[in-house]
Image: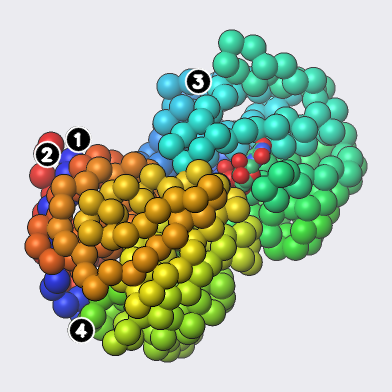
Amino acid sequence: MDKLIIEGGRPLKGEVKISGSKNATLPVLAATLLTDETCVLRNVPKLLDTNTMVRLLKALGKDVDWDKDKLIIMSNGKPSPVADYKLVSTMRGSICVLGPLLTKLGEAKVSLPGGCVIGVRPVDLHVKGVEALGAKVEVEAGYIIAKARRLKGARVYLGGASGPSVLGTANIMMAAALAEGETIIECAACEPEVEELANFLNEMGARIRGQGSPRIIIHGVKKLHGADYRMSADRIEAGTFILLSAMAKNSNIVVRDCDYHQLTALDDVLKKVGATVVSQKDVVRVKAPKVLKPVSVTTYPYPGFPTDIQAQYMALMSLADGVSVVRDTVFPDRFMHIAELNRMGARIRREGGSAIVEGVGELCGAPVVASDLRASAALVMAGLVARGKTEIRRVYHLDRGYENIDHKLVMLGASIKREKE
Ligand code: UD1
């Protein structure tokens, strides 16, 4: 396992290019299971999670070739409906092979992804969705086993206790793409990654409309064909670098290849904290204010403030001039980073689904442990602005979702080294 060693306090200057979106790529890769024809995906981020998905596709009957940031996915003529525990357990995103396998092969046996450090992660909405389309579903020995001759379109309500489900919507949309008749998903997730999946499916010959809104209408077709598609930029990676820019004093970071319209909730908050934001086409430049105002946020499904930048925002608020409250309604237990930020001098306490953040004058370097993907990013940000040395262990979490992050930061002038633990 690797660790990162950061010497904090260096000014960060220069341009950073945002990679392709991880959360859009994973379901799009799963969607290639819906056709026997070849698909080409461009601007694919090289990450642990994309590699895991590629390994899963290989186990499910695909040959996959990497060519720089391009993936070529071909059928190897040996489709399998079984998504094994070993692969699914390392990455929850792999649950989205359920819909494509079921609708294409008539059966799917997908390991339950299990819980993870950001809290319990149920799959009831995925199951409810495929059952509504006529599948028989059983849970046996840790696997979801779903069967159906041909799925039939239906009206499906996909709202859960914490709102819509992103991958649940993706799964049902993919299942419905080859179902007989029309499916209407009500309370669908509106995340740009869901919209992107629908666009990719339409490129494959699907008939989907309403993507990006809470009602998606899918007219099932008999067959889908191959497609050549370019993944858009990762809004969460962009949000992370933008928050770093708001935090790093005497710095000047230019974030390139960013669709800032997807980050309106963040933009609104940045203006309230006093940061200067200039955005033009796909370039965003954010300047840290002299004094950071404390601003409370609550995470919501899109277009609300994303849970995936909650930890990074908390790192920013740990340096604000006063008290703020950070509440997560999407994953109310996603607070593992509190203890680690506190090791670096932050003053944060948890109260239920909220964190009370008392801003401090400065953070100081410390040995810390990365608990999950976005928490790791928060610790890197804190380390970059802290006084002294920060050692972050278990950075493989970071490698799941940030392409070449150490290299990108070094190019901005950060002192950051990777060593074996
Ligand atoms: C996706 C993202 C993840 C992001 C999350 C919320 C990927 C690969 N991952 O995860 O980065 O943090 O969206 O924006 O795209 N829920 C249920 N029942 C279900 C499914 C979910 O109750 O069957 C709940 C979850 O516990 C959570 C909420 O719904 O409280 C949202 O989860 P969901 O949108 O499903 O997250 P993912 O799609 O797994």
Could you tell me which secondary element the residue under label 2 belongs to?
Answer: strand
Could you tell me which secondary element the residue under label 4 belongs to?
Answer: loop
3 vs 2, front mark: 2
Q: Is residue 421 left or right of residue 222?
A: left
Q: Is mark 1 within 8 Å of ligand 1?
A: no
Residue for badge 1: 1
Q: Give x and y (percent) for residue 239.
A: 43, 67
Name the amino acid type tagged 3: Asp
Q: Earlier in the sequence, mark 3 or mark 4?
A: 3
Q: Is residue 286 left or right of residue 61?
A: left
Name the amino acid type tagged 1: Met
- Image point (89%, 40%), residue name: 154
Name the amino acid type tagged 4: Asn
Q: Quadrant of the C terminus?
A: top left
Q: Residue furthest top?
A: 141
Residues tagged 2 and 1 counted as in contact (Cβ below 8 A): yes
Could you tell me which secondary element the residue under label 1 belongs to?
Answer: loop
Cα distance in 3D space between marks 4 and 1: 33 Å
- Image point (21%, 65%), residue name: 363
Residues tagged 3 and 2 counted as in contact (Cβ below 8 A): no
Query: Does 79 sit above or below residue 45?
Result: above
Q: Is mark 2 within 8 Å of ligand 1?
A: no
Cα distance in 3D space between marks 3 and 2: 29 Å
Residue 343 in sight: yes
Residue for badge 4: 250
Name the amino acid type tagged 2: Lys
Q: Is residue 207 left or right of residue 390?
A: right
Number of residues whose C-alpha sits closer than 10 Å to that of mark 4, classed few (under 14), some (14–19) or many (20 or more) = some
Q: Earlier in the sequence, mark 2 or mark 1?
A: 1
Q: Earlier in the sequence, mark 4 or mark 2?
A: 4
Q: Is mark 3 within 8 Å of ligand 1?
A: no
